[in-house]
Amino acid sequence: MRIGFLGGLSGRVADLGIGGRNGAILAVEMRNRQGGINGRAIELITEDDQQDVEIARQAASRLLAGKVDVVIGPMTSAMALAILPQFDAAGVPLLSPTVTTNALTGLDDQFFRVVAPTAAHVFKSAEYHFRENGLRRVVLVWDLLNRAYSESWAGDFHTAFVALGGEIIAEVGFASSGQSLSALAASILAEKPDGVVIIANSVDTALLVQQLRMRAADLRIGTSEWAATERLIELGGRAVEGLVVAQYIDRDSTAPAYLAFRKAYRERFRHEPGFPGLTAFDATNVALDALATRSDSQTLKQALLAQGTFAGAQSPIKFNASGDTQRDTFIAVIRHGEFESQH
């Protein structure tokens, strides 16, 4: 039995893709040690989309040609929009650990996800920044290369923040390839904001925060969930101290299933799973559970929807009729080189 994994395993988003791949590997290895599915071993085939639309489509074609039953991924919204038509045509489910764009909400297609669309959770970030962080005049800075995600997040944050009484004084899109982050930082600060919220990957976020802090050491800065990997702290160093970071993971969770997963992941890969490892582990187990319980008369999509609710390492995963789910988001602040949960 074959399943696929598709994500960015190289380039600026590699921390997201590698964490996701490792979570999928761990889930498959654990299931194979338990006898696989109905006595059949599971083979995981991985592909690197390089965060490039054409490369992603070619990788998707290879996975489908390899007769996979399901693909875990992709890890970014832009890639999901690019390849979903191929999976719809083939009748093969695409089960994403991390894609949250509103553009894929409520559709009758082959797309499933184990995180909620941005409209369901971004208000929590807006409320924290307004009520706890004291922000009133904010510049939103967002990544143009994953526009399907960042535009959704920015739009939902804008709506929620303004409804609370705040003001979005500017929205700045940027593409990391070739653009000077120094010049970007200067243009952001020219707007004289009391806060900046960055919607980008961990690498670009860390580097941009460094540029902003060089010019305005006390500026209050926040990020979306996309940046919330260990790479953000590793690259950002002292500059990211005090950064407010939205999270898909409750890092203080004492759920036995999560503690067991985290221990197994760290032993296997020698680093923290973060949110990509956790959500990919969940997504892979959802797929494997559905494959194990599917009847001969069911497609995998039908099996996923028929079962509906699956166990997750931190919380249950319950799909609605269009393959969307609800998952909480959490707020952390980086202090002393660690994500400190704000419960």
Image (cartoon, rainbow, N blue to C red):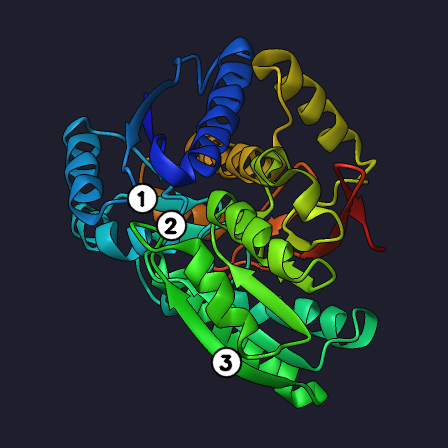
Q: Tell me, yes or no, whether the two marked residues, 1 and 2, touch with CB atoms within 8 Å.
A: yes
Q: Given the image, on which type of amino acid does mark 2 rest?
A: Gln
Q: Residue at x 26, y 43 (%)?
A: 92
* Residue furthest out toward the front: 215
Q: Residues within 10 Å of mark 1 (few under 14, many from 20)?
A: some
Q: Position of residue 260 (x, y in %)?
A: 73, 23
Assess disc 2: are there few (<14), some (14-19) or many (≥20) residues with their C-alpha within 10 Å of its C-alpha.
Answer: some
Badge count: 3
Q: Is residue 106 visible?
A: no
The mark that comes first in sequence, 2 or 3, is 3
On screen, residue 35 above or below 48: above
Q: CA distance from mark 1 to mark 2?
A: 5 Å
| Residue 63 shown left or right of residue 135 in the figure | left
Q: Are marks 2 and 3 in contact (CB under 8 Å)?
A: no
Separation of disc 2 and disc 3 at Cα? 45 Å
* Residue 170 numbered mark, or none: 3
Residue 230, by quadrant, is top right
Please state which amino acid type lies under the numbered disc 3: Ala
Tag 1's secondary structure?
loop
Q: Residue 99 shows which numbered tag?
A: none
Image quarter (top left, top right, bottom left or bottom right) of the C terminus:
bottom right
Q: Nearer the viewer, mark 1 or mark 3?
A: 3
Q: Is residue 29 above or below residue 94?
A: above
Q: At numbered mark 3, what does the secondary structure look like: helix, strand or loop? A: strand
Disc 2 marks which residue? 302
Location of the N terminus by quadrant is top left
Residue annotated with mark 1: 299
